[in-house]
């Protein structure tokens, strides 16, 4: 299995931004420039989140999806404020390859089933913003990591897959932007419960962190933002590093 290197771009007010633990948000660049950069740099996939759409009770910004589609030749996933079948249809028409849903799935889990039946489970991704709340216990959070839903993350992962989600993106709030490595314990716990591809998100700081997530948690995708945005890790060099360690990647 070829493991995917995914660049994540959080978008707010038409700009790519980045924070730590979902706080201290700072400006990075415009989506078009980074989309082209990552397309040329060898990323396997892009992940775009309109991070304020759900909290502002609006649908995703269609303008930035159009702009991104015109600049990239690689698959990209879009999330943030997607709450209807029409929203998904719209982003697919604009060039997105996958739709990522989060808050809408929590409010109405049957939305996952309906979307996967219409578009195919391989195009429907559920993103989970997860925070540790006790020993071996994690909850799903919403509203930009501010609201504890009380939902057990491990159980929610199983529910989502049972309803038809073809992939899960596991965003560790505790690790987000900290560059101390992915939450391996969380990833392994979820991996033991579901059989769909997992994407690790939150915490990458060194090439070894990507390797650890793949080897220890057997994730299919590793996602990062700031270390790629600020060119602290080159994607081509990362892939060569992983290949030298026996990991199958697309070069």
Image: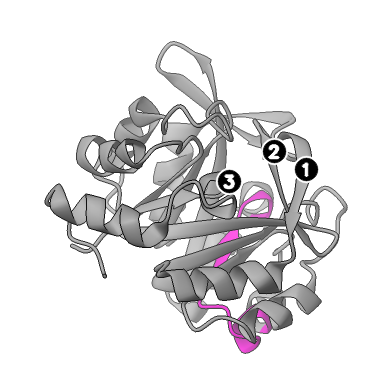
Lateral position of residue 101 relative to residue 15, left or right: left
The C terminus lies in which quarter of the figure?
bottom left
Q: Which residues are magenta?
A: 90-104
Name the residue located 73 percent from the left edge and 52 percent from the top edge.
Answer: 51
**Residue 70 versus residue 123 in the image, above or below:** below
Name the residue located 63 percent from the left edge and 88 percent from the top edge.
Answer: 93
Alpha-carbon neighbours of circle 3 within 10 Å: few (<14), some, or many (≥20)? many
> Is 143 part of what is drawn in magenta?
no
Please report whichever mark, 2 or 1, sits nearer to the chain's N-terminal start. 2
Whether residue 224 can be seen here: yes
Label 3 and label 1: CA atoms lie apart by 11 Å
**Residue where numbered disc 2 is placed:** 19
Rendered image: mark on residue 26: 1
Q: Position of residue 214 (x, y in %)?
A: 26, 44
237 or 214, which lies in front?
Answer: 237
Alpha-carbon neighbours of circle 2 within 10 Å: few (<14), some, or many (≥20)? some
Whether residue 116 can be seen here: no
102 or 155, which lies in front?
Answer: 102
The N terminus lies in which quarter of the figure?
bottom left
Lateral position of residue 171 relative to residue 239, left or right: right
Nearest to viewer (mark 2 / mark 3): 3
Rendered image: mark on residue 226: 3
Name the residue located 64 percent from the left edge and 75 percent from the top edge.
Answer: 88
Please report whichever mark, 2 or 3, sits nearer to the chain's N-terminal start. 2
Label 2 and label 1: CA atoms lie apart by 6 Å
Extreme residue in the top direction? 135
Under tag 1, what secondary structure? strand
Label 2 close to label 1 by CB (< 8 Å)? yes
Under tag 2, what secondary structure? strand
Q: Position of residue 12 (x, y in %)?
A: 80, 56
């Amino acid at each position: 299995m070829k493991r995917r290197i995914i660049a994540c771009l959080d978008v707010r007010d038409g700009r790519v931004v980045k924070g730590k633990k979902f706080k201290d948000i700072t400006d990075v660049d415009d989506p078009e420039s980074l989309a082209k950069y990552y397309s040329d740099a060898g990323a396997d996939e892009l992940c775009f989140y309109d991070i304020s759409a759900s909290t502002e009770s609006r649908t995703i910004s269609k303008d930035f999806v159009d702009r991104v589609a015109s600049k990239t030749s690689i698959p990209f996933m879009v999330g943030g404020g997607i709450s209807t079948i029409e929203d998904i249809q719209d982003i697919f028409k604009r060039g997105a390859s996958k739709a990522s849903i989060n808050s809408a799935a929590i409010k109405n889990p049957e939305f996952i089933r309906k979307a996967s039946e219409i578009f195919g489970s391989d195009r429907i991704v559920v993103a989970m913003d997860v925070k540790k709340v006790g020993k071996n216990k994690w909850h799903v959070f919403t509203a930009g990591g501010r609201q504890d839903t009380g939902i057990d993350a491990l159980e929610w992962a199983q529910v989502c897959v049972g309803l038809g989600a073809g992939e899960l993106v596991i965003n560790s709030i505790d690790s987000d932007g900290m560059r101390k490595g992915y939450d391996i314990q969380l990833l392994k716990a979820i991996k033991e419960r579901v059989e769909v591809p997992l994407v690790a998100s939150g915490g990458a700081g060194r090439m070894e962190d990507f390797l650890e997530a793949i080897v220890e948690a057997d994730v299919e995708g590793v996602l990062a933002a700031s270390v790629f945005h600020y060119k602290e890790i080159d994607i081509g060099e990362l892939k060569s590093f992983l290949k030298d360690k026996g990991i199958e990647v697309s070069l």
